Image: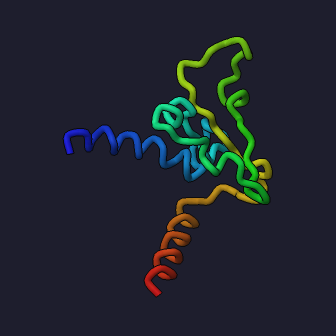
Amino acid sequence: MKDRDKVKAIIDVVTPIFMRQAGNMGDVVYFYSPKAQSDKGRATPAFVSQGGDKTLVCINNQLFKIAPEQKRPDDFLFYAFKNPEKWPHLTQEELRQARKARAEKKSA
């Protein structure tokens, strides 16, 4: 409970990225830290190798615009859909309607 404000701040920052509404982050839909995964004894997340219409590509170079020899201060990897036209950005109203439909389907 003592870190509630910190957790809320993280959620507030990450939610627009995850919901593809953060204009400064391009089309990021997934991200993770390989070091954190390794430190916890976990494998690469399954979403990295998902295929079909949801195939992903790493877009770190486009996001950070750094030379290959430069080291970034973190080890996060950011991914976008390979075919973003199949997954358009949703407006706030479209998100609200999708959540409502999902909730109604769950309760049925």
Percent position of residue 12, x then y: 41, 45
- The residue depicted at 55 percent of the width and 70 percent of the height is 98
Residues 104 and 42: in front is 42
The image quarter in which residue 69 lies:
top right
- The residue depicted at 78 percent of the width and 55 percent of the height is 85
Residues 92 and 88: in front is 88
Residue extending furthest left?
2
The image quarter in which residue 89 lies:
bottom right
- The residue depicted at 53 percent of the width and 60 percent of the height is 92
Residue extending furthest bottom?
108
Q: Is residue 88 left or right of residue 40?
A: right
Vertical side of 16 occupied by 94: above or below: below
Residues 44 and 21: in front is 44
Vertical side of 70 occupied by 99: above or below: below
Percent position of residue 107, x then y: 43, 83
**Protein image colouring:** rainbow
Residue extending furthest top?
69
Q: How many marks?
A: 0
Q: Is residue 6 left or right of residue 59?
A: left
Percent position of residue 59, x then y: 71, 35
Q: Is residue 108 left or right of residue 59?
A: left
The N terminus, quarter of image: top left
Percent position of residue 96, x then y: 50, 67
- The residue depicted at 62 percent of the width and 34 percent of the height is 77
